[in-house]
Each structure stands twice: as structure tokens, then as C-alpha cells.
Image: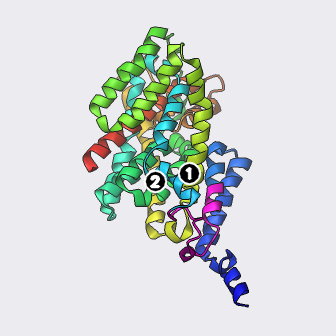
Amino acid sequence: MSGLEKFFSLTAFANFSPGHVVMLLIGLLFIYLAIKKEYEPLLLIPIGFGILVGNVPFLENANLQVGIYESGSVMNYLHFGVLKGIYPPLIFLGIGAMLDFSTLLSNPKLLLLGAAAQVGIFATLLGAIALGFSPQEAAAIGIIGGADGPTAIFLASKLAPELIGAIAISAYSYMALVPLIQPPIMRALTNSKERVIRMKPPRSVTKLEKILFPVVGLLLTTFISPSAMPLLGMLFFGNLLKESGVTKRLADTAARPLIDIVTILIGLTVGASTQATTFLTPKSVLIFALGALSFMVATAAGVLFVKLMNLFLKDENKINPLIGNAGVSAVPDSARVSQMIGLEYDPKNHLLMHAMAPNVAGVIGSAVAAGILLGFMM
């Protein structure tokens, strides 16, 4: 009987709690949204399954070395890349190897939209401080507004490691829910005339411009924000691999196998870090709410800034405000939302290429913002 009692005490049934039920349901919801609704399946399936893995209950004082927070467990070793900020720069390397900055180079003023969308980061930072979070925690929470999971993980790993699970889940959740969150804001802030503005086709960009951009971009951004070097250095390095034309194998590796492997690892371990006994706290719920606010403010700021710019532009140079939402760095989903909403009001007005300019600018902007916050808060 004592053997049976010990066996039962080690099973999940004996260590189950209501918190585990909540997290398991959330994990299943993520998987459902990824498969049924196709909301960022490459992110939500690893994260959702990671939530299931992290919330199989076990006897925590038995030294089984299975939990992500137990020293010596396999999941703990995999989680090391999140805690030490190793995975995010590798993600940025792959992103850089995939991005095409041509539309941004052809219309540089759209870079301002990527900067405007970062307003959500700093507004949420102030709000989080007002709610009692420390400046370091508030900075890590605010970066969720950039809709950039790797940047959020990178900054949280440096400033608030204890909140990394909640921050990462929030950032990736809002990245996946871009098609649900942004359209109502875009419609509310624009009128029927603005939604059908047709923009000039982007000019052709030379190969020399494409090669020079990652070099010049690296120097300009990291001179402003040296703390962002791990992210921006890898982003521009990946882009140079792509645009140089002589390192195709390296660019393909970074853009496909490498980023896929790191996405699996980061998604699974971030999901597993939501272990109910550690993750389910009032702080986590508040972070999720602040993250939503940050993302909505960032979207609104991008749209409103376009409207402001249009006051000073000639009619032939006006910008469609529906691309303002793409200033957040959820690449390419926010640009696709611009295209989708634009086609609703004018089936022949294709905004995707124009929206990619603020979208890639948002990637740079969120990394610069993270570097600035890191420099101030460390």
C-alpha cells in the first residue's frame, strides 16, 4: 500500500490544481486558434503545446528534474536561451535575411511611421510605473507594444527575468491576434475618403542602395542605441547576407532552417514557462492587460501620425492612413491587415508593398527603443 501511495503521489492526478486547468485550457485555445483560424500557427502551436508541457502537474519537491524551473532538467537547459537572451538575436538574424527594405528605401519618410508606433511602448511604461511596477519591470512590459516577441524576450531577460513568461506570452499573443485587434482601431480613426487614398508606386531601388543600407543602418542605429547591438547587429547582418548576392547559402540557412529551429525552441520554452504554480499571479494578468493597451496605443499612434503627415503633403504625395498600423513590428501580419482593410474599400487599391515600409521600420524602431530602455534602466 505504501508503494501504491508513493506512486499516486508522483502522478499528475495527485498534484492537480485549478490553475493547471486554466493553463491547459489556454494551451488548447492557442492550438485551436493556430489550426482552425490560422492565427500565426508557426508561433501559436509551439507556444500552445509548450503550455501543455509546462502544466502537466508533478510533485515539485521530489527532485524529478522535469519542470522548466528545476535545475538540471532538459527544459531548464533549453530555457537558458530565453533567460540569457540568446534566442532573440538569432531570430533577428533570420528576419534580416528575409526582409526586403526596398519599399522603405524608395519612400524614406515612411520610416517615421515605424517611430510613431513606438509611442505605445513609452505610454505603457508610464502606466505600468503608475500601477506600482518598478521602472525596470515597466520598461520590459512596455516593449510589448512593439508587437515584437523576440525584442520583448530580449529586454525582459535583461531587466525583469522573473516576468519573462508573462511578457513573452503577451507579446506573442498580440502578434498572433493582429487581424482581430487592429482593424477596429483603423476603421474608427479613418474616414471613407482617407481609406481610398492611392499612393504612388514605389520607385525602383538599385542593388548598391540595398547593399549599403544594412551597413549604414547598423552604424546609424547602434550609434544612437549601442545597447541594441545584439538585435540590430544580427538584423542588418542577415540582410547583408541576403542583399550581397554572394552568400546565398548563408542567407537561405538563416532565413529558413535556423529561424525555424530557434522558433521551435523559443515557442516551446516560452509556453512551458507558464507553469501554473509560478505563472498564475495577479502580476501576470495585469501584464496581459497592459500589453493589450500598449499594442492598441501603438496601432492608433501609427494611424494618427499618417493623418498628421498628410496635413503637410501635397495631394499626389499623400499617404493612406490604413498603412499606419503597420508601424508595429509584427512582420508581415500588420502589413497584410493594411492590405485587407484597404481592399474592403477599394478592391483595386493594393497597399501591401507600401505597408511593408513602416512594417520593417517598426522592426528597427522597436529594437532601437529596447536598446534605449536597456541603456537607461540597467
Q: Which residue is mark 2?
A: 291
Q: Residues within 10 Å of mark 1 (few under 14, many from 20)?
A: many
The one nearer the camera, 68 or 37, is: 68
Q: Can you give x and y, in whole percent of width and height, for residue 174 in the image?
A: 54, 49
Image spot of residue 80 (x, y percent): 48, 52
The image shows residue 339 at horizontal and vertical percentages of 60, 30
Image: 202 above or below 255:
above
Secondary structure at numbered mark 1 = helix
Instruction: Give the residue number, with chain letter if any, for mark 1.
Output: 173
| Residue at the left extreme, as displayed | 376
Q: Quadrant of residue 40?
A: top right
> Quarter-wise, where is residue 138 in the image?
bottom left
Disc 2 vs disc 1: Cβ atoms closer than 8 Å?
A: yes
Q: Which secondary structure dominates the residues rendered in magenta?
A: loop
Point out residue 309 in the picture as x, y percentages from the top left corner. 37, 28
| Chosen colour scheme | rainbow
- Answer left or right for 20 relative to 69: right
Q: Which mark is residue 27?
A: none
Residue occupying image coordinates x 61% and y 76% = 18
Q: Earlier in the sequence, mark 2 or mark 1?
A: 1
Q: Three-letter amino acid code at disc 2?
A: Gly
- Which residue is located at x 33 percent, y 62 percent? 133
Range of magenta residues:
49-71
